[in-house]
Image (spheres, grey):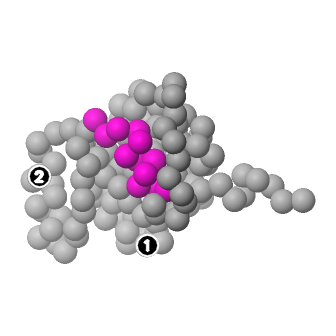
Amino acid sequence: MTVEIDQRRRVLIVDDECVITDSLVTIFSLRGYEPRGVYSAEEAITLLENWQPELVIIDVLLPAMNGIDLAIRIKSEWPQCHISLFSGHSATRDLLDEALKNGHTFEVLAKPVPQSELLVIAGRLFGEPPQSSLSNAS
């Protein structure tokens, strides 16, 4: 007998805005993913040492270590992990430019990112067919 949870796709959400993190964890869970949420880059690194997701969705502006520096570290230490960044701040451009100078290229989705767009990104990454939108999630 196989355990269903072993076949669920792992997704990590990293955002210091608890409401966003918790909402995305719920949305991904309702879609059959195995999501976990943390509120800082440091928490993400600690979690990644024992639990490797296939996708990490990261807010760019985080306290202490920013999301781009976290993404660079993830690419270095867990290269099989896919990364999606999002931000609602204009300061993101400066961080992206600095990363580019060091050979790191990232696309950043503009906040607020519709839940459907994140689900499409995850579905495309995992080769899953498109799903209809959730009726009660926001």
SS at mark 1? loop
Instruction: Tell me residue 58's x, y (percent).
Output: 36, 49
Would residue 111 be found to the left or right of residue 76 on screen? left
Q: Which residue is mark 2?
A: 93
Q: Which residue is mark 1?
A: 79
Which quadrant holds residue 53? bottom right
Would residue 50 be found to the left or right of residue 85 on screen? right
User: Dividing the image into 4 quarters, which one contains the C terminus?
Assistant: top left
Q: Residue at x 31, y 52 (%)?
A: 85
Instruction: Tell me residue 46's x, y (percent).
Output: 50, 52
Verify whether residue 118 appears in magenta.
Answer: yes
- Which secondary structure is most common in the magenta stretch? helix
Q: Is residue 24 visible?
A: yes
Count neighbours of disc 1 (C-alpha within 10 A) and say few if under 14, some if 14 to 19, many if 20 or more. Answer: few
Would residue 21 be found to the left or right of residue 50 on screen? left
Q: Amino acid at mark 2?
A: Arg
**Which residues make up the magenta segment?**
112-123
Q: Residue at x 11, y 61 (%)?
A: 97
What is the count of numbered marks? Answer: 2
Q: Earlier in the sequence, mark 2 or mark 1?
A: 1
Is 79 rendered above or below residue 109? below
